[in-house]
């Protein structure tokens, strides 16, 4: 599977299916892909309804016919807009179109549903944990134990989500072999240092510092 960090929190997973997570493209100064560039997508997963996460998801589903997957309150809104939507909540796992999505806790607010969530997306036997926006939480021990992600994408901006120091502790709790810091430097208010994060991660974990637009293969 190929994983592209589009920028900010937006990921594109490409394998036997194409999956977008938190596709905030329009108005995202870090985005390396525009809404016009997206012509095919099977599943769109959204962690919460803050604008820098729900982003262009409805438009993408409308133009590609992708299935919308999110917390039930957000998916209900998507369904009202005429999209094909999967409703779910924390603790659940759904499988649709060859893509498995598990919803896990996050410590962060949201408007619809009141809370943000994280997701573990499994495609072609590879499991990707996208933490969404979150603070540090002991839930990460269980996320690591129960879903055994192959890679984690963690926010490190230090204002709305974890500081590099807390994100480094999250890696220890998750015991995930590979980790990529995201959700930093998109705007002046969320300046952070992926190098500091990397230097603080203790143990046998691979920290991969990507630039928006970079891809990795798993
Ligand atoms: Ni948020
Ligand atoms: Mn955010």
Image: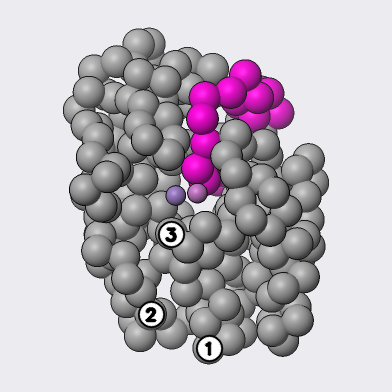
Q: Position of residue 130 (x, y in %)?
A: 51, 44
Question: At 35% across and 11% down in the image, what residue appears?
Answer: 202
Q: Is residue 127 magenta?
A: yes
- Whole-percent x, y for residue 62 in the image: 58, 86
Spatial separation of the CA atoms under disc 3 and disc 2:
14 Å
Q: Residues within 10 Å of mark 3 (few under 14, many from 20)?
A: some
Q: Is residue 94 visible?
A: no
For the record, the magenta segment spans: 125-146
In-image side of 78 versus 210 (left or right): right
Q: Quadrant of the N terminus?
A: bottom left
Q: Dot 2: what SS?
A: helix
* Pointer 1 residue: 63
Q: Nearer the viewer, mark 3 or mark 2?
A: 3
Between the residue at mark 2 and the residue at mark 1, the CA separation in whole angstroms equals 10 Å
75 to 21, vertically: above or below = below
32, above or below 166, in the image = below
**C-alpha gap between disc 3 and disc 1:** 20 Å
Residue 52 is tagged as: 3
Residue 9's tag is none
Q: Earlier in the sequence, mark 3 or mark 2?
A: 2
**Labels 3 and 1: the sequence-earlier one:** 3
Question: Circle 2 sits on which residue?
Answer: 35
Q: Position of residue 19 (x, y in %)?
A: 53, 64
Foreground pick, 13 / 29 = 29
Residue 120 picture location, percent across and down: 61, 44
Q: Residue at x 68, y 58 (%)?
A: 112
Colour setting:
one colour
Magenta residue check for 213: no
Q: Is residue 105 above or below residue 41?
A: above
Q: Is residue 90 above or below residue 196?
A: below
């Amino acid at each position: 599977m190929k994983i592209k960090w589009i920028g900010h929190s937006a990921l594109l997973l490409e394998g036997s299916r194409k999956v977008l997570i938190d596709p905030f493209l329009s108005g995202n100064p870090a985005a390396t892909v525009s809404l016009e560039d997206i012509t095919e997508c099977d599943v769109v997963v959204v962690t919460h309804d803050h604008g820098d996460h729900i982003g262009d998801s409805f438009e993408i589903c409308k133009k590609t016919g992708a299935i919308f997957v999110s917390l039930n309150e957000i998916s209900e809104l998507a369904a009202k807009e005429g999209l094909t939507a999967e409703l779910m909540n924390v603790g659940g796992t759904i499988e649709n179109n060859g893509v498995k999505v598990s919803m896990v806790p996050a410590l962060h607010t949201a408007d619809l549903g009141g809370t943000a969530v994280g997701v573990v997306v499994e495609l072609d036997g590879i499991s990707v944990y996208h933490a969404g926006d979150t603070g540090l939480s002991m839930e990460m021990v269980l996320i690591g134990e129960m879903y055994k992600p192959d890679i984690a994408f963690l926010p490190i901006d230090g204002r709305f989500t974890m500081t590099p120091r807390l994100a480094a502790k999250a890696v220890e709790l998750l015991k995930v072999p590979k980790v990529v810091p995201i959700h930093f430097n998109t705007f002046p208010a969320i300046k952070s240092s992926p190098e500091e994060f990397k230097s603080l991660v203790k143990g046998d974990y691979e920290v991969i510092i990507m630039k928006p637009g970079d891809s990795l293969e798993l």
